[in-house]
Amino acid sequence: SSPSIRSDSPGIELAKLLLSERQNHLFDHWSDPGVDDGRKISFFDQVTRLNGSYPGGLVAYIRNARKLLADSKAGRNPFDGFTPSVPSGEILTFGDDNFVNFEEVGVKEVRNAAFVLVAGGLGERLGYRGIKLSLPSETTTGTCFLQHYIEYILALQDASCSLVQGQDQTRIPLVIMTSDDTHESTMQLLKLNSYFGMESTQVKLLKQEKVACLKDNDARLALDPVDSYKIQTKPHGHGDVHALLYSSGLLNVWHDAGLKWVLFFQDTNGLLFKLYERVPCQLSRCSRKAKEAIGGITKLTHTDGRAMVINVEYNQLDPLLRASGYVDGDANCETGFSPFPGNINQLILELDSYRQELTKTHGAIAEFVNPKYKDSTKTSFKSSTRLECMMQDYPKTLPPSAIVGFTVLDSWIAYAPVKNNPEDAAKVPKGNPYHSATSGEMAIYRANSLILRKAGVQVADPVVDSFNGQEVEVWPRIAWRAKWAPTFSDVRRKVGGRCSISQKSTLVINGRNVYLEDLALEGSLLVNAVDQAEVRVGALFGTEAGPWKRVDYRDDSMPEELRIRGFKIERLEQEEANFTEPGKFSLNS
Ligand code: UGB
């Protein structure tokens, strides 16, 4: 009855629905009609937004929450009736014939794929205030994660299109899911860098909305602690990506354009595109250390005969295994790894069946709730909670006939995320990966060194060093831009003769047609070459770079992106060779 609030406002209808769902407390404190109208209008706007961004609307959200909260209170085991076992999948060895065959098929298929990057999360655990996509994946070149990803997609696009005549117009779509926390900064990063070479129309940002917080077991919505005319909200999780893809209409656009695959990936895995060329492999997994903070891929078989291959989150895997007769729970087997492959959330879905499925579910994903109770009576919460969902739970709603497969590769080539701050990383049990900026960067050098080794280059062994209390292997700092060699076959084609690289060397290749031939590198070399310059890099000796400057994570005079990795690479001895004109060149000592 406030004068400025129209009675036909969609929010008013929703408010009536809220009342029917026992949400009266939201209005108890409201001032008299005519007072605080602006705040009341924005309340209805918010309710309308919350309603529109959840499959089935706010009423469905409240009802789902009530059920999940009741299950949680009753201590219902989500795996009741299911027995876990180790699933069988495709195990690949990087660089062998089978791998190269997959790679070939993948490169052909990639022009039929759309890429979806979930990047709505903030790096709170990491100690970095910016968006994680803007972090350097390694500091030798300073290439940030988003640039790294986009350049690989473009390089794969070129490689794929060159295989098929008349396909050079193909532009692989990239969707980035953002949130209120990351949207503006992601847009800015793209615009400031001219989309890192992608056409702006190729990239679409879909912003996920937060969901309403719940204050008690009856799923009564929580009011914002600082604004009582606002519902408190929190992130709903990366599972939102499915509903957003559905509601954006993009699945139909892609289908009409003849695309066949949708590839999902996360914000900080510098090794990601060492694998992505193999589109036909369904889900990419890595070997997993027991208790490593990544989910485990598990086959769950129900007493009624149903079976599914699914991710079981790391906090649920150990109790599930113990309750199912695995006396040691989540433990390593004789290989030194958990028998359950690690989930790295790189999912590949066949577009056609995905689109059909989402037509039925509208992208709703099985949710969970994780309330922190005040005491064992489980009657009240320490703080408000909310429903959450994960993108890898998509198979949970599929019929048993759905085909879900996965691929396992060694971790060195598959997975090195940047999630933990130095203090937490240093506490990771010895032998388990740190998942820090330090280990993420070192993993890139290790992977590149090992890839070159597999291509015949003699790369020196690493030394062990410690940064911010984390012991890591330090390999030669080898980095290349995606266009040099997006696949292993490209690397092999571009390396010849007898090449060697010493441990203290740094090698950066920034050019499509750079060939390493009888290179003997004992220093730092950076080759920049335009596409039309064919450069053969021969015997070249450099001065080995000096020690790195250490950076203590507590040193707040240093930028955060250096504090979280614990070192700063000095570029004093760097030999830079620039080829700016077309032609054939050789680069020798
Ligand atoms: N993300 C969003 O886009 N929106 C959100 O609301 C939340 C996150 P985390 P998590 O492979 O490394 C997952 O926080 O959830 C984005 C798997 O569940 O880094 O702890 C965010 O920006 C787990 O099984 O990961 O764990 C980021 O890009 C394991 O596989 C991504 O979602 C682990 O990832 C992941 O968010 C892993």
Image (cartoon, rainbow, N blue to C red):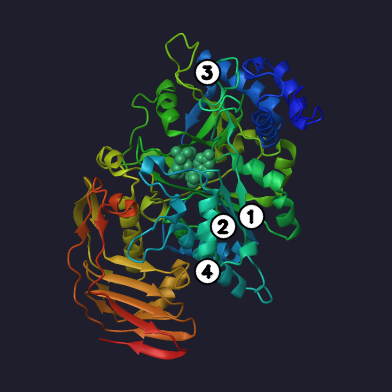
Dividing the picture into quarters, in which one does residue 199 lie? bottom right
* Mark whose residue sits in front, 3 or 1: 3
* View extreme (right): residue: 8
**CA gap, disc 4 and disc 3:** 47 Å
The CA span between labels 3 and 1 is 36 Å
Q: Which mark is residue 279?
A: 2
Task: Decide which of 326, 369 is in the foreground and name it.
Answer: 369
x then y, percent, for residue 557: 26, 52
Disc 3 CB within 8 Å of nearest ligand 1 atom? no
CA distance for labels 2 and 4: 15 Å
- Determine if residue 168 is in view: yes
- In the rendered structure, which amino acid carries the disc numbered 2? Val
Residue 99 at what x, y percent from top left? Answer: 47, 60
Secondary element at tag 2: loop
C-alpha gap between disc 3 and disc 2: 38 Å
**Residue at disc 3, secondary structure:** helix
Quadrant for the N terminus in the image: top right
Answer yes or no: disc 2 within 8 Å of ligand 1: no
- The tag on residue 247 is none
Q: Are marks 4 and 1 in contact (CB under 8 Å)?
A: no
Can you identify the residue that label 3 sits on?
72
Quadrant position of residue 428: top left
**Would the CB of label 4 be found within 8 Å of ligand 1?**
no
Badge 4 is on which residue?
Answer: 155
Q: Which residue is mark 1?
A: 261
